[in-house]
Amino acid sequence: MWNPKPLLVVVSLCISALSSPCTAASGAGKPLVAAVTKDASTSLYTAPLKDGHPLVLDLTSPVISLTTCTSKNGTVTTLSANATDGQNPLFPVSFSAVASCTPQAKVPAGAVGVAGLAPSSQSFPVQVARTQKVANKIALCLPSDGKSTSGNSVGVAIFGGGPLFFIPPDRGDFTTMLAGTVPLHGFNGSPGYYVSSTGVAVEQNRVSTSGGMLVVGLSSTIPYTAVRPDVYVPLLRAFDAAASGPNFPWMSRVTAVAPFERCYDSTKLPQSLLGYSVPQIDVMLEGGQNFTVLGGNSMVQVNGNTACLGFVKAAAGQAPAAVIGGFQLENHLLVLDVEKKQLGFTTFLNAIGLSCSNFNFTLAA
């Protein structure tokens, strides 16, 4: 269960303006939006939240932490983003927030810390919620490495709820067009977001695993889905059976490329909006809904001729049955509602001709 602690300071809001001083609580009621980019060298996702410098977006961290301060006991810092109506950025907003000064071992070049998104009294979303007087809710759409039709690969995060419209906006508010919603749970006191799963299926055939309900976590800081050995081994066996069956005659195994165990000749794999035509994997969730992993989120292009199944074996022990990594979350809109303890998610956006890069970051007139 989540156990929020009291906030250490009163957080105040101010709107950045050249012509007037900032005042507390100005602009309250508007969610904040930030562009999300993927760092090629670390596969981490960042947003420019600290004086235009990136912070790593971490679904498993409960605090904001900076690499640019020295006090171990924490500090009050100024962070910034743009208010939004869900279609465009409206105006810049700055706010004071509590941050720790714990050095981070792994941040991309140029990043100055981590924006912890996990439920807590000092996470980035809750501090936005306090300053903006908005919901403690995140709409997060992680971009892929690939370029969008606009030439950029930039995702979007909205803190404070919806709506969220992609270009063209007449397609509607995607925070209301969810493929599924499931309850969020705690897991052994660990920070982060966890859901219950009834099992895994490959090509709609249930994978045989021991035990009952499985715990599945979400992570934006591990690149690929990590699966506990007792689930990973039967999952791989089921994928092998499907890949060698009559429905996928084009799948030709090649030498594995670490850290992956199953790789294929990608020159023989048909492609579509769904990505490579390979067996579909479903994480079956509480309530009968599935988080579906299609070729666009399952196959990692490791070189010009080779694509590998982007699932890796986790260490044995008391870890969750699986932690869905960034690659499998890309180009799905996730709606994390901390107040309702609920996860919502859309279908794979590429399947409907969109991507997380279809948000309009042009400042509204």
Image (spheres, rainbow, N blue to C red):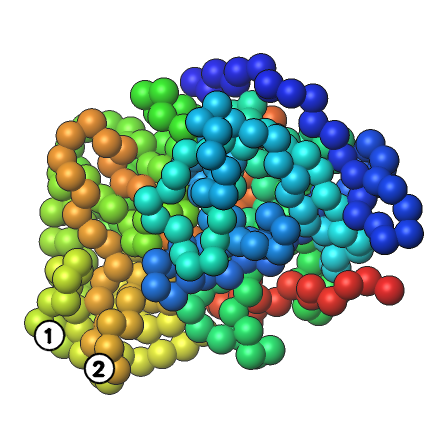
The residue lying at 38 percent from left, 42 percent from top is 104
Q: Mark 1 points at which residue?
A: 254
In the depicted structure, whether residue 28 falls above or below residue 20: above
Identify the residue shown where x is 24% and y is 77%: 303
Provide residue 268's location: percent of width, then percent of height.
23, 83
Q: Mark 1: few, some, or many residues within 10 Å (few <14, many ≥20)?
A: some
Quarter of the rendering occupied by the C terminus = bottom right
What residue sits 12% from the left and 47% below the top?
Answer: 233
Residue 228 is drawn in which quadrant?
Answer: top left
Left or right placement of residue 101 versus residue 105 in this view? right
Secondary structure category for the residue under label 2: loop
Q: Position of residue 322 (x, y in %)?
A: 27, 40
User: Is 349 placed left or right of 86 in the picture?
Assistant: left
Q: Which of marks 1 and 2 is nearer the N terminus?
A: 1
For residue 305, the mark is 2
Horizontal side of 59 relative to 327 (left or right) equals right
Residue 211 x %, y %: 19, 28
Q: Where is residue 162 in the image (x, y as percent from the top left)?
A: 69, 45
On the image, which quarter does residue 281 sit in?
bottom left
Is 52 or 132 nearer to us in this picture?
A: 52
The answer to whether residue 207 is above or below residue 251 is above
Q: Is mark 1 on a helix, strand or loop?
A: strand
**Which amino acid type is shown beneath numbered disc 2?**
Asn
Marks 1 and 2: CB-CB under 8 Å? yes
Seen from the viewer's position, the closer of residues 246 and 283 is 283
Looking at the picture, which amino acid does disc 1 mark? Val
Q: Can residue 204 be seen in this view?
A: no
Give the Cα separation between the discs numbered 1 and 2. Answer: 10 Å
Relative to residue 250, is residue 197 depicted above or below?
above
- Quadrant (top left, top right, bottom left, bottom right) of the N terminus: top left
Q: Which mark is residue 53?
A: none
